[in-house]
Amino acid sequence: MFRPAALFIGLRYTRAKRRNHFISFISLVSMIGIALGITVLITVLSVMNGFDREIKKRVFSMVAPMTISSNTGYVADWQGLQKLLKQYPYITNSAPFATGEVLLNYSGSTQPAIVSGILPDEESRMSELADKMVQGKLSNLKSGEFGIVLGENLATLLDANLGDKITVVTPQVSLTPAGVIPRFKRFTVVGIFRAGSGFGFDRGLSFIHLDDAQKLLGLGNNVTGLHLNVNDVFAAPMLADKLRTQLTSTANITTWADQFGEFFHAIQMEKTMMFLILLLIIAVAAFNLVSTLMMVVSEKEPDIAILRTFGATPRMIMAVFIVQGGVIGFFGTLLGLAGGLALAWNVTDIVNWIQDVFHVQFMSSSVYFVNYLPSEIELSDVIKICTASLVLSLLATIYPAWRASKMDPVESLRYE
């Protein structure tokens, strides 16, 4: 009898009498405040998730999850090492590379860059470089033909196009009758790729065939190392630790986290702080329920006294007002959830429409990595936000409900 009665009365109290529209208005404001807070929080976190997704996609499309090199500066018998790595189930692919810092010269312009020697077929299984070609093909890199693939920004700085011959100068030197001179070689531009802005891939990277890189860098049959793909890129640091114990002491194993881990950690920290800050909006709206329920308790003082004389226990009175506040919090959370999901799903189209109508550019790829506002809804975020909202709403009802339960019915009915 206790629970249905408390529930019925609590639901009935959510509808104010005609003479008490102000209390009803305050309740509506509290509900709308909770809804707006949840809408904003879901949308902001979804946008941050979208940026996180785009950044990871850009990084992982060009950067190998794991890299094996050697403390000696080169890896001999890389074919044998490649066969050895096939026995580890968490390693899905591997590809050799030879890399070095060079200067690229063409038509009076000189630009520093990193040149990487690759095997095009194996590199296509390691990264998305082949899919990012905007001119030419990655397969145009052939052994002995000394072709080179440039990043789009690097090609622009050099003013180089397909078919142009650029000079690649290495730090290594050659002994000649004229003395010591830098080692250099002319390469033909056979492709240009675009990886996107933000990490300098387009400006600082160039690719040549592995055989040509070995000749250019004086490595002989050796390579700089092997790039590895793993079945779970986020487990790469743990897998690297496991692999270190199974290889020789001269092996040097690095992961994407060594290069970009702090960057992604900063993004996650920013997301966490944004969640806590915006949660205060919901907290302010939720604790508006305190004043709302205190006014309701004052208004319903005679009703409470009558219920007590009919045998209602303090616990039942307390439950009545917890139900009332909980209903306001529940419907505010429900409205906020619907609004947040709707806005997060359509925020990209909304921002694009505003940009088209008012001829403004909010997002620039040179600053934000992308030229649109990405969004990705994560179920875990939605659950955390709604749970926090409901908990804060229920906490806000405790004090007014406790005050109502402690009310003396004799004093309340003395002047009625």
Image (cartoon, helix red, strand yellow):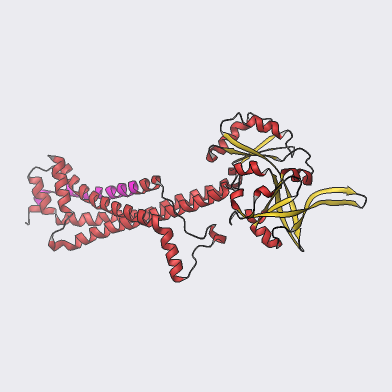
Residue 242 image point, x, y percent: 59, 31
Give me the residue at 64% from left, 42% from top.
Answer: 121
Q: Is residue 249 visible?
A: no
Give the camera-side residue of 37 and 203: 203
Quadrant of the rendering where the N terminus is positioned: top left
Q: Is residue 382 visible?
A: yes
Which residue in the rendered view is the most extreme toward the bottom?
Answer: 358
Residue 153 image point, x, y percent: 65, 59
Which region shows up in magenta? 386-411
Q: Is residue 282 left or right of residue 180?
A: left
Tell me, yes or no, whether the highlighted magenta stretch contains residue 399: yes
Residue 85 image point, x, y percent: 63, 31
Instruction: Name which quarter of the figure residue 96 lies in.
Output: top right
Query: Is 276 drawn above or below residue 76 in the view shown?
Result: below
Residue 16 image point, x, y percent: 16, 58
Give me the residue at 13% from left, 59% from top.
Answer: 17
Q: Is residue 64 left or right of residue 353?
A: right
Q: Is residue 297 left or right of residue 203?
A: left
Give me the residue at 66% from left, 33% from top.
Answer: 82
Give the camera-side residue of 353 and 343: 353
Query: Is 81 drawn above or below residue 335 in the view shown?
Result: above
